[in-house]
Amino acid sequence: MAKLIDGKRISQEIKDELKAEVAALAQQGKTASLAVVQVGADPASSVYVRNKKNACAYIGIGSESYELPEETTEEELLALIQELNQKEEVHGILVQLPLPAHIDEEKVILAIDPSKDVDGFHPQSAGALMIGSKGFLPCTPAGVIQLMKRSGVEMEGKNCVIVGRSNIVGKPMAMLMLRENATVTVTHSRTKNLKEVCKQADILIVAIGKPKFINEEYVKEGAVVIDVGIHRLEGKKLCGDVDFDAVEPHVSAITPVPGGVGPMTIAMLMDNCVETMR
Ligand code: NDP
């Protein structure tokens, strides 16, 4: 039976470590506060925003909420970001994505002061990751690394195949795995013979956005499988990009959905917020 990589437990462990660190930093007079900006009232986004604010409260950092109506213009949002960039009491700025279609996400990300870019999406953060210098790491891929480190998954020298090349998961994931000295292959919708490529993986990281796409035909016996995908099926049940029941009997370790990568994203966001205090 495969080992279950428990993101719920590991994310709690990280949040508890951060809570202790924040308490110690507070003794030195250091504080941090996160500004969370949401445009419109998409129910999934509202849940994420609430969870982020709860996590801030748990570890002891401040949070300010900006809930803007759906019809907010790009100019109004950019003006708010400029204001938050200037505001000394705000250490991190998080704009919940996706934004309504009339707002250019790229422009908004670019407007955030890189020293407050706790989501790690600004080109300066992406560039720092690329060249291996200091900067905020994007939360989901950073969470995947922590999951593996804290579960005893050896990464150095392993063949890692990443399915997906998005700017928020696949590409930064590749950079982080290179940092861990894995040999990395990035695949996407034009990759030929995807099954054969995936079967070479000691570590298979899947961020493709298609429910239960990866089945046992894509995995090598004994591989480690990390499922970044998250989908709500009819009847509200959650599933990932990996067909867990089909794959689990063949692998040595696997993340469940829910309870795998999902909870790590917020834990790593909190880590980035605490980074502003260190
Ligand atoms: P995107 O849709 O931005 O990217 C999907 C990637 O998968 C693209 O690079 C695409 O290739 C590739 N792809 C699509 N179809 C195929 C195929 N048939 N074969 C090979 N590759 C394919 O998704 P994200 O990276 O934003 O998210 C991926 C998943 O992770 C989603 O389920 C999302 O909900 C989840 N997610 C979960 C998070 C968490 O906190 N747990 C955070 C972020 C995302 P191409 O580039 O060629 O189009």
Image (spheres, helix red, strand yellow):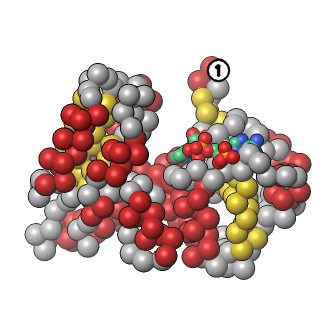
Q: Residue at x 66, y 36 (%)?
A: 239
Q: Residue at x 88, y 52 (%)?
A: 193
Residue 137 image position (x, y, % from top left): 44, 63
Q: Nearer the viewer, residue 60 or 105?
A: 105
Horizontally, residue 147 falls left or right of residue 101, namely right
Residue 182 percent across, percent down from the top left: 68, 75
What percent of the width, then of the height, locates residue 269? Answer: 38, 55
The structure residue drawn at horizontal position 21% and vertical position 34%, both measured from the top left corner, is 76
> In the picture shown, does residue 54 fall above or below 226?
above
Compared to 48, does 6 lie above or below?
below
Describe the element under mark 1 as helix, strand or loop.
Answer: helix
* Quadrant location of the C terminus in the rendered image: bottom left
Query: Left or right: 267 with respect to 88?
Result: right
User: Where residue 128 sits: x, y (%)?
Assistant: 43, 71
* Beta carbon at label 1 within 8 Å of ligand 1: no
Q: Amino acid at mark 1?
A: Glu
Asked whether the viewer can see residue 227, the reply is no
Quadrant where the N terminus is found in the figure = bottom right
- Image quarter of residue 42: top left
Closer to the camera, 186 or 211? 186
Ligand 1 in which quarter: top right
Residue with the mark numbered 1: 234
**Residue 184 in the image: above or below residue 50:** below
Q: Residue at x 36, y 33 (%)?
A: 103
Q: Is residue 212 left or right of residue 172?
A: right
Q: Is residue 161 left or right of residue 249?
A: left
* Residue 197, visible in the rendered structure: yes
Q: Nearer the viewer, residue 127 or 180?
A: 127
